[in-house]
Image: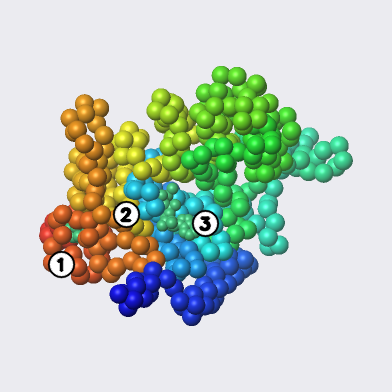
Amino acid sequence: MANEKTQDKKKHYISRKESRQIARENSKAIRKFEKQKKRKVKVDDYTTEMKDDKNIVEVEDLHTYFFSDAGTVKAVNGVTFSVPAGSTVGIVGESGCGKSVTSLSMMQLVQAPSGQIVSGSIRFRADVFKRDSRGRKIPVYETETDENGEEKVKLNAKGKPIIKKNALGGNTYEMESRVVDIAKMPTEAMRSIRGREISMIFQEPMTSLNPVFTIGNQLNEVGRLHIEGISKQQVKARSIEMLKLVGIADPEGVYKKYPHELSGGMRQRVMIAIALLCNPKLIVADEPTTALDVTIQAQILDLLREIKGKINGSIMLITHDLGVVAEMADFVVVMYAGKVIEMGTAEDIFDNPLHPYTIGLQKSKPTVDGEVDELYCIPGFVPNPINMPDYCYFRDRCEKCMGKCSGEYPRLMKVTDTHSVSCYLYEKDAEVKNG
Ligand SMILES: Nc1ncnc2c1ncn2[C@@H]1O[C@H](COP(=O)(O)OP(=O)(O)O)[C@@H](O)[C@H]1O
Ligand code: SF4
Ligand SMILES: [Mg+2]
């Protein structure tokens, strides 16, 4: 009996020796990654190429880990997907499967130092500032034609050249389009992309908004930070314009209010306004409607759809709710335990789900006509992220499990040009497709 108890303890507790070893390994790994992020590098060092020019983002074999006291949590463990320009991609999966960590990785906002992007690429088509030999941005000046018909730089009263204004009212600098690898970018360089080119909407607006500043203040702050050279009046006008764009009926009134004076739905609209302020190319929305009630949820989804058309950008919509994905997404990525287990167009995933987990997710979705008395629940648990097995992570919950499933983890197989799945049931279909 006593022996059994010690055996049991051994299973659940880490010895002091093991704990010291984990701490040593963690600090070594963390030091390495932190050093990499602070290094001084040229743009060329993290410039890359898209595999497909139609995409705005390509995530390839991304690994993001947390070096915790209990061991390494492989929160994102080899994720690959892309976002075609102008489309909405839905990332779906149960709580804890790594959706948020994937999106935070794309923003370089994973909680450091314990959380680190360990390997993989996040290719993003960005407009970056051109730099001179001393690393300074190159302004574009206003010009005028003099009496001899020659074009000259326009000077202000103090004799200084006047920098041309852009559409947002800020200074214009020479830009160039580059594909950057966010996973390899130093922190400093990421600052000019985050908020300006990619912006994020979080689940709980109350925790993302600062309770002690007015809505106007918070919008203006983002404007001032990202639109260099914008005047006070212009930034205010832009803030109010954005509040109007997200369907707030009294934008001037809301501009002066504090977050606690607004309803949950209004706060989420404000968050969307902040996200839109700098005309981003990509909006990452992490469970944007989960904290809201159903009618407001529908309004916010309508708003996101409407806005996507207006800004001509792309949306990455993260949710545990298949219903939301069905309504919004052109492409769907299904995640399970830190990996992509199936992806395809919305039709592929909803009309012809392949992976037993995706099929289970669909069965567990409540329907309006309510023919199912009891909600289906996928039996079993997700494996412990610190100690992932080598075989298919879904095996212990899978009704279709066969001998091969205890072998190595099934790779993501292309079943059609648009539809991929990571499951041995479709190995033959994939072989046929790939000849
Ligand atoms: N700051 C953190 N420290 C340690 N583990 C974390 C942290 N954030 C997330 N994780 C772990 O990473 C995994 C994925 O989490 P997350 O991406 O938040 O899931 P979700 O799909 O619900 O958004 C989970 O196992 C979670 O426990
Ligand atoms: S590989 Fe095997 S265990 Fe895994 S989902 Fe497919 S059938 Fe089930
Ligand atoms: Mg999440």
Q: Mark 3: is the Cβ under 8 angstroms from ligand 1?
A: yes
Counting other residues with Cα less than 10 Å from the Cα at mark 2, is it few (<14), some (14-19), or many (20 or more)?
Answer: many
Q: Is residue 116 something one can see in this rendering?
A: no
Of labels 1 and 3, earlier in sequence is: 3
Q: Position of residue 228 (x, y in %)?
A: 69, 43
Q: Mark 2: is the Cβ under 8 angstroms from ligand 2?
A: no
Counting other residues with Cα less than 10 Å from the Cα at mark 3, is it few (<14), some (14-19), or many (20 or more)?
Answer: many
Of labels 2 and 3, earlier in sequence is: 3
User: Which element type, helix, strand or loop, lies under badge 1?
Assistant: helix
Instruction: Say what amino acid the circle numbered 1 marks.
Output: Lys
Which residue is found at the position 49% from the left and 52% from the top? 104
Along the viewing direction, whichever of 84 and 285 lies nearer the viewer: 285
166 left or right, relative to 434? right
Looking at the rendered image, the quarter that the C terminus falls into is bottom left
Q: Position of residue 6 (x, y in %)?
A: 36, 76
**Real-space CA distance between mark 2 and mark 1, rounded to the nearest whole angstrom:** 19 Å
Instruction: Say what amino acid the circle numbered 3 marks.
Output: Val
Q: Which residue is mark 2?
A: 336
Which residue is found at the position 43% from the left and 37% from the top? 290
Can you tell which quarter of the image residue 405 is in? bottom left
Q: Do the residues bearing badges 2 and 1 touch, measured as CB atoms within 8 Å?
A: no
Can you tell which quarter of the image residue 326 is in? top left
**Real-space CA distance between mark 1 and mark 3, rounded to the nearest whole angstrom:** 36 Å
Q: Position of residue 159 (x, y in %)?
A: 85, 42
Q: Which residue is mark 1?
A: 404
